[in-house]
């Protein structure tokens, strides 16, 4: 009985190891959804202001090909949408201001998976690529202030986490990601840094 159990365990581990061998593929998708609603209010005479209400949505699909055992080279595509809304009250009337921002990051990435005999598989990855951001500002009163701007430039990032294998080919992906974007217009340089916790699924196949 012990021999059969040992042989079964070895076979299961071998099946898991096959998923990150050269020639295999990994496809994953993770998302981060964050909500930040404030209830603060500032009053000055007959004018009052609500604190901003911010909603952020992020999704990052990726695909990689194992060029050697445990190392997958592929592409990460990150999409982030942020909406910020402010309301100003003046003499009983409400004036709404809204800012919508969307960012797309396309990044060739290399990811290394650290295999073990357990169902927990740590990984580290890094990449460099391109980003584009579009920001719109609008109000229901001062339409002359409505604007739309688009910027693009260099993006680079890193990621790390754990894949918790449900089956030899499907796992729950829990990790952290960091993305840096930079653009320059004339003498003005804009740099953003984003750090987030992500959750999703990873699929391994040949």
Image: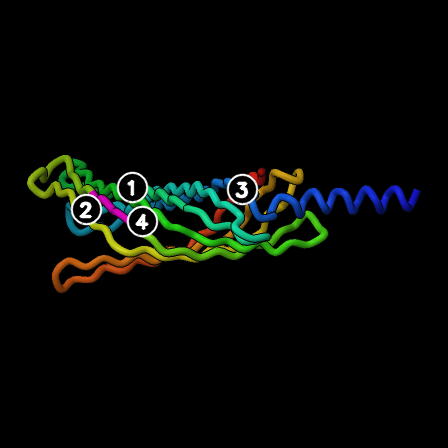
Figure quadrant of the C terminus: top right
Q: Nearer the viewer, mark 2 or mark 3?
A: 3
Spot occupied by residue 158 in the image (x, y as percentages of width and height): 44, 57
User: Which residue carries the number 3 mark?
Assistant: 25
The kind of secondary structure element at disc 2 is strand
The kind of secondary structure element at disc 3 is strand
At a point 10% along the width and 43% down the height, the residue shown is: 145
Q: Which of 156/15 is in front?
A: 15
At a point 34% along the width and 44% down the height, the residue shown is: 80
Q: Which mark is residue 150?
A: 2
CA–CA distance in space, label 1 to label 3? 35 Å
> Of helix, strand and loop, which mostly describes the magenta segment?
strand
Region of the chain picked out in magenta, as a range: 130-135
Q: Which quarter of the picture shows residue 165?
A: top right
Spot occupied by residue 22 in the image (x, y as percentages of width and height): 57, 48
Q: Earlier in the sequence, mark 2 or mark 3?
A: 3
Q: Residue 40 carries which label?
A: 4
Q: Nearer the viewer, mark 1 or mark 2?
A: 2
At a point 36% along the width and 57% down the height, the residue shown is: 156
CA–CA distance in space, label 4 to label 3? 49 Å
């Amino acid at each position: 009985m012990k021999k059969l159990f040992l042989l079964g365990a070895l076979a299961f581990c071998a099946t898991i190891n096959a998923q990150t061998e050269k020639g295999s593929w990994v496809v994953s998708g993770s998302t981060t959804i964050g909500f930040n609603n404030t209830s603060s209010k500032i009053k000055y005479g007959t004018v009052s202001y609500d604190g901003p209400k911010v909603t952020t949505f992020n999704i990052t699909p990726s695909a990689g090909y194992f060029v050697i055992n445990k190392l997958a080279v592929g592409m990460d595509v990150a999409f982030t949408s942020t909406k910020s809304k402010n309301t100003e009250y003046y003499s009983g009337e409400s004036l709404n201001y809204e800012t919508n921002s969307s960012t797309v990051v396309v990044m060739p990435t290399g990811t290394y998976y650290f295999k073990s005999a357990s169902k927990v598989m740590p990984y580290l990855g890094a990449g460099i690529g391109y980003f584009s951001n579009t920001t719109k500002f609008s109000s229901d009163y001062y339409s002359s202030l409505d604007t739309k701007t688009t910027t693009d430039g260099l993006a680079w990032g890193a990621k790390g986490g754990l894949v918790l294998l449900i089956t030899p080919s499907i796992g729950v992906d829990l990790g952290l990601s960091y993305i840096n974007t930079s653009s320059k217009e004339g003498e003005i340089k804009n740099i953003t840094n984003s750090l987030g916790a992500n959750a999703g699924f990873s699929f391994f196949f040949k």
